[in-house]
Image: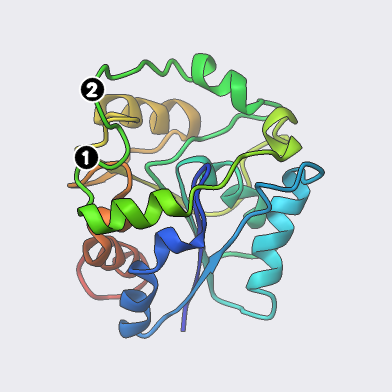
Amino acid sequence: MTTFALIHGGGSSSWDWHLVAPALEERGHEAVAVDLPTEDESAGWKEYADAVADAVSGREDVVVAGHSLGGFTAPLVAARRPVRLVVLVAAMIPSPGERFNAWWSNAGWEESGLDDVFYHDVPAPLVAGAKQRVREEKSRALSDPWPLDAWPDAPTRYLLCRDDRLFPPAFARRHARERLGIDADEMDGGHYIALARPLELAERLDGYVSARPA
């Protein structure tokens, strides 16, 4: 049985994965959605990695999936303990020593100019639920340099969303190639894919580790 450690993006919570987790469990996996210590002003990247690593302690077959800003945390977990795979879902890919605020210009990101870059394809009740659970990013992690000297020695896949208005496909493809030297996988949907298309996302995650086609 594979354990999926599910890491939310900036300003969010484990609730973002509440539809994906049961779909993974129906496919025979364990799903552990983690709340990062985003509102703890003293929390750095170590505490972010601790939160995920502690949540899957004792599991042997672990896949770490990080959404959006969760792309900063997912590889930290892979550097700390053996993981089967890192999956970056519409995610930011940090470079050694890079700070969150510097990532945007370093990565060559540009605003799409479109309205509602987050929830445009998410059902209204789920948008309301997400907005009720927005958390402030107060931790010092976002002002600290990303601590790894290199990407961890773990297989990594990048899954972009073709309708993403925050990280459009052209940017995401280039970002994955420039930062990791890999070609991104693709699926339909916008940035909040775990709420917009949870069953399809679960199928894609399952497909990375099983013989079943995604």
183 vs 192: above or below: above
Task: Return the residue at label 2.
Answer: 114
Q: Residues within 10 Å of mark 2 (few under 14, many from 20)?
A: few
**Is any atom of residue 148 visible in this view?**
no
Front residue of 77/69: it is 69
Residue visible at 28% across and 42% down in the picture: 119
Residue visible at 68% across and 80% down in the picture: 58
Q: Is residue 186 left or right of residue 62?
A: left
**Is any atom of residue 18 visible in this view?**
yes
Q: Are marks 1 and 2 in contact (CB under 8 Å)?
A: yes
Residue visible at 74% across and 48% down in the picture: 40
15 vs 10: above or below: below
Q: Earlier in the sequence, mark 1 or mark 2?
A: 2
Residue visible at 28% across and 29% down in the picture: 168
Q: Is residue 84 left or right of residue 126?
A: right
Q: Based on the displayed image, in which of its 4 quarters is residue 25 positioned?
A: bottom left
Distance (Cα) linking label 1 and label 2:
10 Å
Q: Amino acid at mark 1?
A: His
> x, y (%) of residue 94?
57, 32
SS under mark 2 = loop
> x, y (%) of residue 88?
44, 48
